[in-house]
Image: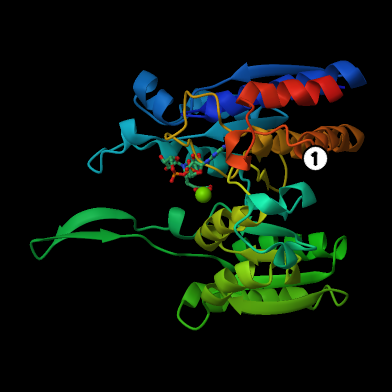
Amino acid sequence: MQAYIALTPGDGIGPEVVAQAQRMLDAVAARYGHTFRYTTHLIGGCSIDQHGTALTDEALAACQSADAVLLGAVGGPKWDDPNAAVRPEQGLLKLRKGLGVFANLRPVKVHHALLDASPIKPEVLKNVDMVVVRELTGGLYFGSPKGEDVVNGQAHAVDTMEYTESEVERVVRLAFQMAQNRKKKVTSVDKANVLATSRLWRRVTNRVAADYPDVTLEHMLVDTASMKLIASPASFDVMVTENTFGDILTDEASLLAGSMGLLPSASLGESGPGLYEPIHGSAPDIAGKGTANPIGTILSAALLLRYSLKLEVEAAALENAVEKAIHARACTPDLGGKLSTSQVADYMLEQF
Ligand SMILES: NC(=O)C1=CN([C@@H]2O[C@H](COP(=O)(O)OP(=O)(O)OC[C@H]3O[C@@H](n4cnc5c(N)ncnc54)[C@H](O)[C@@H]3O)[C@@H](O)[C@H]2O)C=CC1
Ligand SMILES: CC(C)CC(=O)C(=O)O
Ligand SMILES: [Mg+2]
């Protein structure tokens, strides 16, 4: 097949990990007789430096016309001035909104060869295989009003958590559909004892659940969920939650797998290109050192093959290459290995 993939490497380790994922995609194309065409676009701090904005309309339009978008990460200390009018993260939010990708799927698996890489006891990690479905284009990151002003002579800031019924319904429905093909359990995470948005979330989830009688639904408050994720992670199958809760809970969940550098994500909408990115940020503390773990981005490329290009065999082959590398502990220092970012991909390519 012929496919057009837009690359948005971004800042910090973003370009380092996207380069390795692109090498893996090229290997897939060569082995299975596909042609992948790429364009590369600035996003985040590098776009601010060049264009004064974190994502130009032209870059967004190019991503919208692609079959899929593969992103690295945005941000870094250079652009962290609290007084700055433009921030790198605005580019990422504009891209997610512009692509309409409301559901961010973040699978969390524990590889038996990495049990010692996690601070959690091995017996607790047994049978962990879950996916967090994070709402991605609503909630606190997008609600209005948002911003700073002065009230009664005092600096004042506001962020707004808002959701409509249809925004909740579409992402919850997707979570139930995923659960039907998995262990048939949905855990909906909210803060319904305090937040109005969570009470709406819970009501809509209960209504949607009636359409999926084969799936068990449990509701869990987010504070409890953050504890259970560490205490009994194997009890989860599909966890569905709003934007901010999902953002935070998945960084926590990366500890189960062993490193922030391991977890991939796929962001999907009703139609149009999907957006694929590791769950981590631009990791300024290791940027430029060649030690970033590329696996989260390579697994994101596998999800791109699966969801956007419908190439299941190819996606599984890429995941298998990652499995082999992990099994052999051909890994970067975050997993106790000695390999560089590109050497991890070298190893996978040799086995591919
Ligand atoms: N999707 C995105 O583009 C995101 C961007 N950010 C931005 O990234 C910048 C840094 O944020 P942090 O809070 O430091 O979060 P981070 O996710 O970049 O890093 C957290 C920790 O995980 C490690 N880490 C992350 N990815 C890794 C990888 N692939 N291999 C090995 N170690 C890895 C880092 O070295 C660091 O110690 C900030 O500007 C933040 O706004 C943060 C999260 C997501
Ligand atoms: C950088 C933020 C906009 C979001 C984030 O941390 C994430 O998507 O994981
Ligand atoms: Mg995050």
Q: Quadrant of the C terminus?
A: top right
139 vs 40, left or right, is left
Horizontal and vertical percent for residue 337? 64, 35
Please, is residue 258 above or below residue 179 in the view?
above
Identify the residue position indicated by label 1 in the image: 327
Horizontal and vertical percent for residue 347? 76, 24
Nearer-the-camera pick, 92 or 320: 320
Horizontal and vertical percent for residue 105? 69, 51
At a point 68% along the width and 47% down the height, the residue shown is 269
At a point 47% along the width and 23% down the height, the residue shown is 288
20 vs 44, left or right, is right
235 vs 282, left or right, is right
Horizontal and vertical percent for residue 67? 73, 29
Disc 1 within 8 angstroms of ligand 1 (CB) = no
List the single residue furthest toward the left: 153
Nearer-the-camera pick, 54 or 211: 54
Instruction: Name the quadrant containing residue 229.
Output: bottom right
At a point 55% along the width and 29% down the height, the residue shown is 291
List the single residue furthest toward the bottom: 193
Q: Quadrant of the N terminus?
A: top right
Amino acid type, residue under disc 1 in the picture: His
One can see residue 231 in this view: yes
Please, is residue 215 above or below residue 68 in the view?
below
